[in-house]
Image (cartoon, helix red, strand yellow):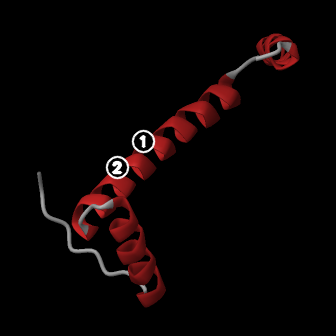
């Protein structure tokens, strides 16, 4: 692992401390987990934006039909 010096606004630091305490983790561990989750989420969203940008209208229509079918299922 590599070390990162992270300066946070006072309010964000207060929230991090409170959340870490409620979860029973140290601030550093929680901050690392949150940063890693945010990176994964951003990479996933970037991938989906790229797929949407390059997708044909026919594929978009098909995907919307599939999505509609899934939304209609009970579960």
| Foreground residue among 64 and 17 | 17
Secondary structure found at label 1:
helix
Vertical side of 36 occupied by 54: above or below: above
Vertical side of 28 occupied by 43: above or below: above
Q: Residues within 10 Å of mark 1 (few under 14, many from 20)?
A: few
Task: Tell me what residue is drawn at x 12 percent, y 57 percent.
Answer: 2
| Foreground residue among 5 and 27 | 27
Q: Mark 1 to mark 2: distance in Å?
A: 6 Å
Would you say the residues marked 1 and 2 are in contact, meaning their CB atoms lie under 8 Å apart? yes
Task: Tell me what residue is drawn at x 44 percent, y 51 percent.
Answer: 38
Q: Tell me the residue that label 2 is attached to.
A: 36
Q: Residues within 10 Å of mark 2 (few under 14, many from 20)?
A: few
Residue 68: image location, x then y, percent: 86, 17
Task: Tell me what residue is drawn at x 49 percent, y 46 percent.
Answer: 42
In the rendered image, which quarter is residue 29 located in?
A: bottom left
Residue 15: image location, x then y, percent: 45, 76
Task: Tell me what residue is drawn at x 49 percent, y 43 percent.
Answer: 41
Residue 44: image location, x then y, percent: 51, 36
Seen as rendered, the residue at the extreme bottom is 10
| Foreground residue among 37 and 56 | 37
Q: Quadrant of the C terminus?
A: top right
Secondary structure found at label 2:
helix
Vertical side of 10 occupied by 37: above or below: above
Q: Tell me the residue that label 1 is attached to.
A: 40
Q: Is residue 52 left or right of residue 4?
A: right
| Foreground residue among 4 and 52 | 4
In the rendered image, which quarter is residue 61 located in?
A: top right
Vertical side of 39 occupied by 14: above or below: below
């Amino acid at each position: 692992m590599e070390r990162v010096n992270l300066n946070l606004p006072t309010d964000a630091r207060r929230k991090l401390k409170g959340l870490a305490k409620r979860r029973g983790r140290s601030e550093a561990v929680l901050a690392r987990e949150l940063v890693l989750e945010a990176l994964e989420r951003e990479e996933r969203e970037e991938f989906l934006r790229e797929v949407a940008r390059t997708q044909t209208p026919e594929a978009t229509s098909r995907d919307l039909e599939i999505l509609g079918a899934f939304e209609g299922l009970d579960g």
